[in-house]
Amino acid sequence: MRESDIPLTAMSTPSGMLWEWLVMPQGLKNAPATFNRCVTHLLRLVRDFAPSYFDDMFIPSRAMDGKSEVEMHKEHLRRLFALMRKHKLYANLKKCIFGASEIPVLGCLVGKNGVHPDPGKVRVINE
């Protein structure tokens, strides 16, 4: 949120306290689209190896230039974290998955062997 917009978010509580939002509240109608546009713009320098989907970021790394997949993944993470630090973006470590061969995305598991349904989701449907 722009610093000049913070006073516009002020609200008074019944106890007389005055509160201001320092970040955009996610309950606003256009907040997800605005956040997505902001993240896409700020992280455009790493788009070639770290695409984003709303507040999710994926870093699929392959071996190249004589470096292993793990070395490339670490390099990509360092570049991404430096950019996030520069723009004051934060990651929720509880939601982060590092160095995985496949990850859950929108009810599916995505990995180097392709996309397939999450067995946990399929089991619920079959039962």
Image: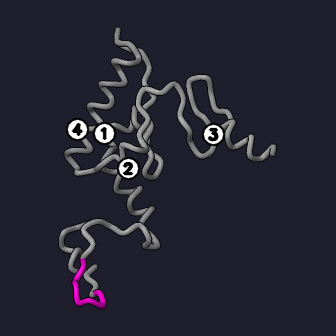
| Quadrant of the image occupied by residue 7 | bottom left
C-alpha distance separating marks 3 and 1: 28 Å
Location of mark 3 (residue): 108
Which residue shows up at 36% across the image and 43% down it? 93
> Where 58 falls versus 5 (above or below)?
above
**Disc number for residue 40:** 2
Task: Say which mark, if any, is on residue 82.
Answer: 4
Is disc 2 placed on a helix, strand or loop? Answer: helix
Q: Quadrant of residue 10?
A: bottom left
Q: Which of the two discs, 2 and 4, labels the residue nearer the N terminus? A: 2
Image point (36%, 47%), residue name: 92
Q: Are marks 3 and 2 in contact (CB under 8 Å)?
A: no
Task: Give the distance between the C-alpha atoms of the residues marked 2 and 1, in whole angstroms.
Answer: 9 Å
Query: Residue 17: within the magenta?
Result: yes
Quadrant in the picture for residue 27: bottom left
Percent across and percent down for residue 99 are: 42, 26
Of callouts 1 and 4, which one flags the residue occurring earlier in the amino acid sequence? 1
State the residue lying farthest toward the top.
Answer: 66
What's the amino acid at mark 1? Leu
Residue closest to the eye, 31 or 96: 96
Question: How many numbered discs sit on the rendered protein?
Answer: 4
Which numbered tag is attached to residue 24?
Answer: none
Question: In the displayed structure, would residue 68 be above or below residue 84?
Answer: above
Judging by the rendered image, the residue that carries numbered circle 1 is 45
| Three-letter code for the amino acid on which mark 2 is drawn | Thr
The residue segment tinted magenta is 13-19
Which of label 3 and label 2 is nearer to you?
A: 3
